[in-house]
Image (spheres, rainbow, N blue to C red):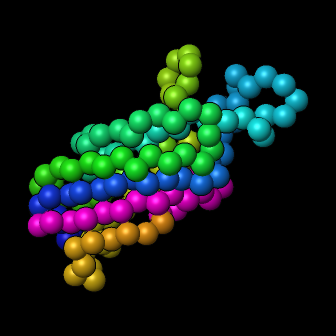
Amino acid sequence: MVVFNGLLKIKICEALDLKPTAWALRHAVGPKPQTFLLDPYIALNVDDSRVGQTSTKQKTNSPAWNDEFVTEVYDGRKIELSVFHDAPIGYDDFVANCIIQFEDLLQNSSKHFQDWVVVRRCLHEAGCCDLMLMG
């Protein structure tokens, strides 16, 4: 198994067409819950360690963050991006997530990766992130 040691710089750019889960809609009022707007943010983990969290964007299903994170990684195996809705009451609602294996990023010997990554739930949504590996 390939692991990554070095400096990880990641910029979380945006997400498009995020869909609220049925659980998030439990507080929706009115006849058209499909128009429910999320208050999304992304939690960023490397393996089981929290690296950071983006700011929360209010009332949008296509948020733009452009938040950057830099962290030193030792024996890193995966990056996890988890999208949540900042719920007004109780725990925040899970929306979608994506796991990127360092092995997949490093197999072409590139130190820079920029692409749209698909975050999954029942439906497919997409978000853009820019990863730079310095090891």
Most distant residue in the right direction: 31
**Which quadrant of the figure has residue 106?**
bottom left
Residue at point 59% right, 54% down? 16
- Count of labels in the image: 0
- The answer to whether residue 21 is visible is no
Residue 50, how many percent across, how many down? 27, 40
Residue 122, how many percent across, how many down? 64, 52
**Which quadrant of the figure has residue 107?**
bottom left
Residue 112, how many percent across, how many down? 27, 72
**Which quadrant of the figure has residue 133?**
bottom left
Horizontal arrangement in the rendering, residue 39 relative to residue 41 (left or right): right
Of the pair 66 and 21, the residue shown nearer to us:
66
Residue 59, how many percent across, how many down? 62, 34
Horizontal arrangement in the rendering, residue 42 relative to residue 94 (left or right): left
- The answer to whether residue 27 is visible is yes
Q: Is residue 121 magenta?
A: yes
Seen in the picture, residue 79 relative to 96 is either above or below; the reply is below
Quadrant location of the N terminus in the rendered image: bottom left
Residue at point 63% right, 44% down? 61
Q: Is residue 2 magenta?
A: no
Residue at point 55% right, 59% down? 126
Of the pair 14 and 107, the residue shown nearer to us:
14
Most distant residue in the top direction: 89
Horizontal arrangement in the rendering, residue 35 relative to residue 46 (left or right): right
Seen in the picture, residue 86 relative to 111 is either above or below; the reply is above
Residue at point 43% right, 69% down? 115
Quadrant location of the C terminus in the rendered image: bottom left
Q: Main secondary structure of the magenta part?
A: strand
Seen in the picture, residue 11 relative to 41 is either above or below; the reply is below
Task: Give, as a single range, the part of the protein colored magenta.
Answer: 117-135
